[in-house]
Amino acid sequence: MKARAARLHGKKDIRIDEFELPEITDGEILVKIVSDSVCMSTYKMAVAGPEHKRVHEDVADHPAICGHEFAGDIVEVGAKWADKYKPGMKFTIQPNMQNGEPWSPGYSYEFCGGDTTYCILPEPLIERGCLLEYTGDAYYKASVTEPMSCNIGAFHASFHTQPGVYVHDMGIKEGGNLALIAAAGPMGLGGLIYALNCDRRPKRVVLSDISEERLERARELFPADKVMEENGVELHIVNNGTADDPVEFLRSFTDGAGFDDVFCYAPVAPVVTLSDAILGNDGCLNFFAGPIDHQFTAPMNFYNVHYEATHVIGTSGGNTDDMIESLELTAKGMDPSVMITHIGGLNAAPETTLNLPNIPGGKKLIYTHIDMPLTALEDFRAKAAEDERFGVLADMVEGNNGLWSAEAEEYLLSHWKSE
């Protein structure tokens, strides 16, 4: 079968290739990819090339398909899995196979990744239970299940202690104070979505950033009074960049006591130091954002580590249980649409990936069987004069509080060129 994909050939070298997929083995599964959400981790992989720990040294000879946040349909099932998986089944994957090897879809495989029309799921991924059935109403919701699982895993990895008891109480503190720092981007909003839907809800959430444009959008999507009414959580969305003393400003929301849990969504030293400074007694700092610099460091208060029992952890990705929890919460009504701000076709994948840090907004969603320039949802109306289909999409988005939807996805897939 022929496939068309965005593949990494070397450092900052992503190309649209057409190639022949080999026949699947008894332990593999052939799938059709419908959507892939572009992750900052893919940008980091593309910038590093073969220097990245998940990229093979011979990537120039065996280019790797980019993208690991994907969803689609099963096309053909190897004999080993015929009793468990069926053609036509919707799916998503957990790319973090946790099998002791660095290799994973979207980084390491010549024939497996998200930015492609078709790909082959390798046997180790299926053996590890990382192929997950998806029964939802839209592929994009499954595509952002993986980034949501990263937040879920981070929330589960946070921990707290009791004086004199050497046992970690895992998870954020229920009924506590939670701060999401540098969090008005897609992953931070994903963290907020989970905080409002998880089973260990905080009493108070403070989401801060220094981009007023992003913050205004976050306030529109999460009105504080509605959040309190529907979720029972006190929410403050604030700009710490305008405060004379950001530490005092943020701690004021806790009457000076500090936060039980702080998530840092930017690998910037002053942001890390700020996150540490607002911790309360037994506060847990999760350094969520992965830096590119192997020597990245930031000052933190070790007096408080000793006398206030503050502590820091870091998490990278979620596990399969986190993915399953995300899928279950989505089925119950948790809506990850707030993360998505741009839509594009496979032709837009290389430029989008390589330029990702410079593109404002949230998640960029690639539909792999269409050609379409990467377009912000808010720009659909302006494009309607050239292409009336954008006008229809604009009506759908504007009718859904500016958010992408299952209805919009269905129209897109029906009216744009499909392979």
Image (cartoon, rainbow, N blue to C red):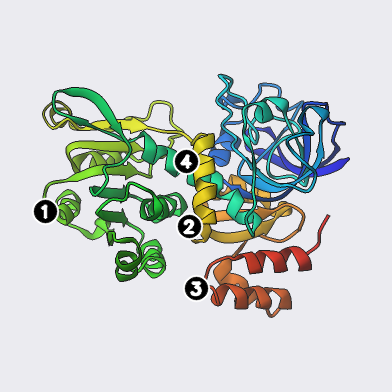
Give the quadrant of residue 8: top right
Q: Nearer the viewer, mark 2 or mark 4?
A: 2
Q: Position of residue 256 (x, y in %)?
A: 11, 50
Of callouts 1 and 4, which one flags the residue occurring earlier in the amino acid sequence? Answer: 4
Query: What separation in Å lies between label 3 and label 1 (alpha carbons)?
Result: 34 Å
Residue type for callout 3: Asn
Q: Is residue 299 above or below residue 376?
A: above
Give the quadrant of residue 74: top right
| Mark 4 secondary-structure assignment | helix
Q: Is residue 227 left or right of residue 290?
A: left
Q: Position of residue 323 (x, y in %)?
A: 53, 41
- Estimate how packed mark 4 is, as few (under 14), some (14 to 19) or many (20 or more) residues with alpha carbons within 10 Å: many
Of callouts 3 and 1, which one flags the residue occurring earlier in the amino acid sequence? Answer: 1
Of callouts 3 and 2, which one flags the residue occurring earlier in the amino acid sequence? Answer: 2
Tell me the quarter of the image containing the N terminus. Answer: top right
Q: Which residue position is annotated with label 1?
A: 255
Of callouts 4 and 3, which one flags the residue occurring earlier in the amino acid sequence? Answer: 4
Q: Which residue position is annotated with label 2?
A: 334
Query: What separation in Å lies between label 3 and label 2 (alpha carbons)?
Result: 16 Å
- Estimate how packed mark 2 is, as few (under 14), some (14 to 19) or many (20 or more) residues with alpha carbons within 10 Å: some
- Estimate how packed mark 1 is, as few (under 14), some (14 to 19) or many (20 or more) residues with alpha carbons within 10 Å: few
Query: What separation in Å lies between label 2 and label 4 (alpha carbons)?
Result: 15 Å
| Mark 2 secondary-structure assignment | loop
